[in-house]
Structure formats: C-alpha cells, structure tokens
Image (spheres, grey):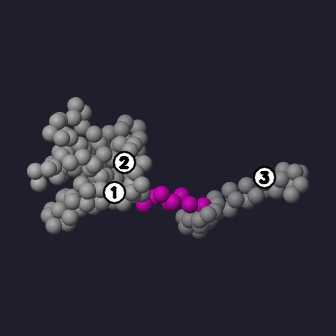
Amino acid sequence: MRPGLYRVFLPLFLAFYGVGGLLTHSRFGGLDLYPLFAWGLYADAPPSETQYTARLLAIDGRALPEPIDVMGTPDFHRAPDYWSDAGVLTRFGAALEAGDAAEAGALRRQFEANVLRDDRVRYEVLKRTYNPLRRRETGAWDEVRLGAFDKDTGAGR
C-alpha cells in the first residue's frame, strides 16, 4: 500500500470499528459481538484465586532460618518438569483439603520424589486464597496450613 493510502484507510477503519462496536452494544440490547465489541470478555473471571504451595521448614534435621516457599523459588520454576510438578502439588493440596487420604498419600510420594531432592526434609502444605487485584496492589493473601510432613529416606530406612 502507498503511504498516502494509510492516512486515509487507517482513520476510516478505526472510526468504523469504534462506531460499529458502540452500535452493536447500544442497538442490539447489550449483545457483545466479539471482536467488534466485548465488554463482557472478562466478566466471568473469579473474584478470588486459590493456590497450593509447600514451605520447607527443615533440611537434614536443621531448621531453616527462614522457611522456603517452593512455588516462590526460581529454581522450581526453571525445572524441566515445572508444570507437572506444580500440578502434582496443586492436586496434593486439594486432596488434603478434601480429606482424601489415599489420593493425598499417592501424591505426597510423587511430590517428595520429584521435587524434594534432599533425603530428610520437613515441610508444610499451604492453601493460599487471594483476590488477584488486591494481591497485585498489596501482596496480601489468606493462608491455611493443610498439614506438616517429614520426608525421611535416609540410610536408616
């Protein structure tokens, strides 16, 4: 296209697009015709989110000076099996919350084998609930402890 054509075509296209979007919303009873107009695109987004995580408390019998949040650790996110491990941790937390001991036991073994590299680790599983907008502004969330566990696969076992 010639440069002069853009000066005519682009403003006309944008004007048509804007007027068309407004007319679809005002003349058709609020019907959103995506991609012309979509006010309700994110209307069904949940007001709160849930995230399950594990926090390391002690390694090899020594308490950590500051607990380590597994989901907040960059090494966890860079791991080759990140999505699989995060899914296992999420399902593990959900099984604990639901009280499904058999499912939680199987997922615990899988989580410990895949994510926790050290032999003796004490950790807790947490459920975090937050409003995404409030968390973005303040970093705040509500936290519930679902259980504390010991991974012990040392030489004595």
The alpha-carbon separation of the residues under discs 3 and 2 comes to: 48 Å
Camera sees residue 90: no
**Magenta region includes residue 15:** no
Left or right of residue 46: residue 56: left
User: Image quadrant for the C terminus?
Assistant: bottom left
Mark 1 residue element: helix
Asked whether residue 40 is drawn in magenta, I would say yes
Q: Residue at x 63, y 62 (%)?
A: 36
Q: Nearer the viewer, residue 50 or 71?
A: 71
Magenta span covers which residues?
37-44
Camera-nearest residue between 99 and 34 = 99
Q: Residue at x 83, y 53 (%)?
A: 6
Q: Say whether residue 78 is left or right of residue 58.
A: right
Mark sitting on residue 85: 1
Marks 3 and 2, the one that precedes in the sequence: 3
Residue at label 2? 76
Image mark for residue 11: 3
Q: Mark 3 or mark 1, which is nearer to you?
A: 1
Q: Quadrant of the N terminus?
A: bottom right
Where residue 68 sits in the image (x, y, percent)?
28, 39
Residue 56 percent across, percent down from the top left: 23, 43
Q: Which of marks 1 and 2 precedes in the sequence? A: 2
Left or right of residue 98, residue 45 in this image: right
Residue placed most toward the observer, 152 or 27? 152
Residue type (three-letter) at the residue carrying disc 3 = Pro
Mark 2 in CB contact with mark 1 (< 8 angstroms): yes
